[in-house]
Amino acid sequence: MTVKATDKLFKSSGCKDWEAVDEKATGAAKTSRFKGDGGMYRVGVDITPGTYRSTGNTDDLCYWERAKDALHSIESIRANNNVTGSAVVTISASDAYFKTTGCQDWKKTA
């Protein structure tokens, strides 16, 4: 979530503790697997770009989203989908974030 200096209030419900993250943070994300119900991941920091598969999704509750920022607006979404069954998504190095809810764990395939 991006909280702007002009925001007057930030409210969340049902979340764990929040922590500040430097917008320019970089790192060597080494994971080839991550939680399918894990929320939002920073591409290049939390997860590496590549093609991932989530299998075993039994209903339409598996949602994924590739985003250009963390503003959670319609304009932020580069691509998204509600998936039944096996899901495959290619996360690009130019994506800023990857959001996933209700999916089985993701595993890198390429």
Image (cartoon, rainbow, N blue to C red):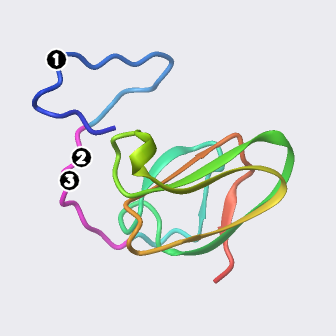
SS class, disc 1: loop
Residue at image position (23%, 39%) is 20
- Read off the magenta span: 20-28
* Image marks 3 and 2: residues in contact by CB distance under 8 Å: yes
Magenta: predominant secondary structure element? Answer: loop
Tell me the mark number nearer the camera, choosing from 2 and 1: 1
Q: Tell whether 80 sits left or right of 67.
A: right
Q: Which residue is mark 3?
A: 23
Of the image marks 2 and 1, the number of the one nearer the N terminus = 1
Q: Which residue is mark 1?
A: 8
Q: Which residue is mark 2?
A: 21
Q: Is residue 82 above or below residue 15?
A: below
Q: Tell whether 92 sits left or right of 94.
A: right
Q: CA distance from mark 2 to mark 1?
A: 20 Å
For disc 3, the neighbor class at 10 Å (few under 14, some 14 to 19, many from 20) is: few
Name which residue type carries label 3: Glu
SS class, disc 2: loop
Residue at the bottom extreme, as displayed? 110
Residue 97: assigned label:
none
Measuring from the top left, give residue 80's x and y in whole percent: 60, 53
Of the image marks 1 and 3, the number of the one nearer the N terminus = 1
* Image marks 2 and 1: residues in contact by CB distance under 8 Å: no
Residue at image position (66%, 49%) is 36
Q: Is residue 86 above or below residue 61?
A: below
Name which residue type carries label 1: Lys
Residue at image position (28%, 36%) is 19
Name which residue type carries label 2: Val
